[in-house]
Amino acid sequence: MAEETLSIRDNRTGEEVEIPIVDGTIHATELGKLGLMSYDPAFLNTASTRSSITYIDGDAGILRYRGYPIEQLAEQASFLETAWLLFEGELPTAKELEAWQDKVRLHTYVHTNVTRFLDGFRHDAHPMGMLLGATAALSTFYPDAKEIGDEESRRLQRLRLIAKFPTIAAWVFRHSRGLPYVYPRNDLDYIGNFVNMTFEIGGRHEPNPVLQRALEILLILHADHEQNASTNAVRGVGSTHVDPFSAVSAGVAALYGPLHGGANEAVLRMLDEIGDVKNVPAFIEGVKKRERLLMGFGHRVYKNYDPRAKLIKRVADDVFAQTGLDPKLEIALELERIALEDDFFVERKLYPNVDFYSGLIYRAMGYPTDYFTVLFALGRLPGWLAQWEEMLSDPEQKIARPRQIYTGYDERDFVPLEQRG
Ligand code: CMC
């Protein structure tokens, strides 16, 4: 028996059980001894897994990947280095990093039929819908990805996804603009190649190193966030042993929603709608009357300033120094100022999250509003894949299949059509 236990007495029967407490949690199946289930429809207080990838202390505003503070990674790491860290658990040596970058370069090309597939979307198709469809379609190009029990195959699929995702994401952007697809250039680094594939016109694109590093930092900040909704989707779908392209497309779908990754797009639409600083107080009053949400505010885990939002504000300074100030920034700053002083937000511990300022930066970089969440997906991909790998290697993980409390009818007899009123 564990040293720490929880005693539960069922007052209906007088039965008592002693449940082990391990790592501050009790195993929900222990309640089965009393014939009870636990009910937690939105996972408010349920750990769905044990994980060694990302640590968050929501009260203290701490985020670490594999033990490394997000501030240090944002300052010093590259995105591919961060992806390696998430996959392998350790920072790569210089030799490992070089070999990893080379391998990624080798896999950046995507089967040319994918371009035809993208061509089939309407000109105004939402970029996240296109990314979602194209990611799922990749599974049909790599049937070997079904070998999810083979560690080497899993490694190859992770590599393929990391390498090809920017190509597809860039082509989604080109499709939206009616521009021809630009193929990967293997003389460029990961971020440079992506930016080139999005913005190159007539064989020319002058890279701006400050903006490219800013984009890289944003991707690092988004790379993992433990059991968020999209990661939970990847793990849940992956737990059926489907291939990783299909599982990741489930993550893209979950991210698309405005309460998750789609919030960065929703923030910009909200700022556009507010239009002017003078309209901010009325907007905040509407939020307090529950007419709407203040998008980009609040978080399930952070009850303090989101550490990523703090870093993003610094990135914004660098970016706006290059591109000039966005007038919408003034509205965002005023929303933040009022909200941080207002009891409604203070009592509920609502602070700006990662999505509050990121959209303004993406816009300054030249990305359209409906494309912002694609950039989030590009950043989150290593996290999804690291979590997928961890889930498959965990002997405790089975197919994710929750239970329910049935609230419907008892048995009743079928009524023939002619007898129904
Ligand atoms: N504006 C106004 N009120 C809010 C907001 C908001 N953005 N967020 C939470 N609240 C209120 C909510 O109404 C509730 O009030 P009460 O207790 O009086 O009923 C209280 O704060 C607690 O909120 P909750 O809905 O129970 O919190 P949750 O953990 O279920 O939801 C959230 C977290 C992120 C979905 C939510 O804060 C939200 O909808 N935020 C706006 C969308 C957003 O910015 N999403 C991005 C999240 S961060 C990055 C990412 O995941 O992509």
Image (tube, rainbow, N blue to C red):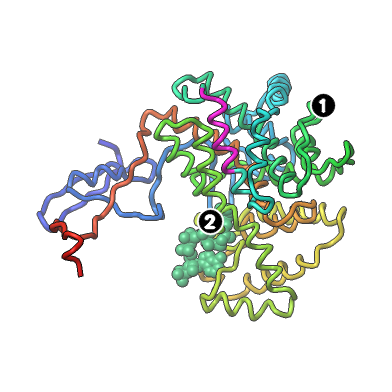
Q: Residue at x 56, y 49 (%)?
A: 255
Amino acid type of the residue that numbered disc 2 sits on in the rendered structure: Asp
Which segment is the magenta one?
132-143
Res. 177 mark: none
**Disc 1 versus disc 2: distance between alpha carbons?**
44 Å
Across and down, in percent, residue 13 comes to: 10, 54
Q: Is residue 140 left or right of residue 27?
A: right
Mark 1 or mark 2, whichever is nearer to me: 1
Across and down, in percent, residue 300 comes to: 50, 56
Badge 2: how crowded within 10 Å, few (<14), some, or many (20+)? few
255 versus 393 height, above or below = below
Q: Which residue is mark 1?
A: 187
Image quadrant where residue 93 sits: top right
Quarter occupied by the C terminus:
bottom left
Quarter occupied by the N terminus:
top left
Across and down, in percent, residue 327 comes to: 80, 67
Badge 1: how crowded within 10 Å, few (<14), some, or many (20+)? few
Image quadrant where residue 269 sits: bottom right
Across and down, in percent, residue 234 comes to: 49, 40
Q: Residue at x 69, y 37 (%)?
A: 166
- Pick the front one: 110 or 342: 110
Main SS type for the magenta part?
Answer: helix
Res. 59 mark: 2
Q: Residue at x 71, y 40 (%)?
A: 171
Q: Residue at x 73, y 80 (%)?
A: 278
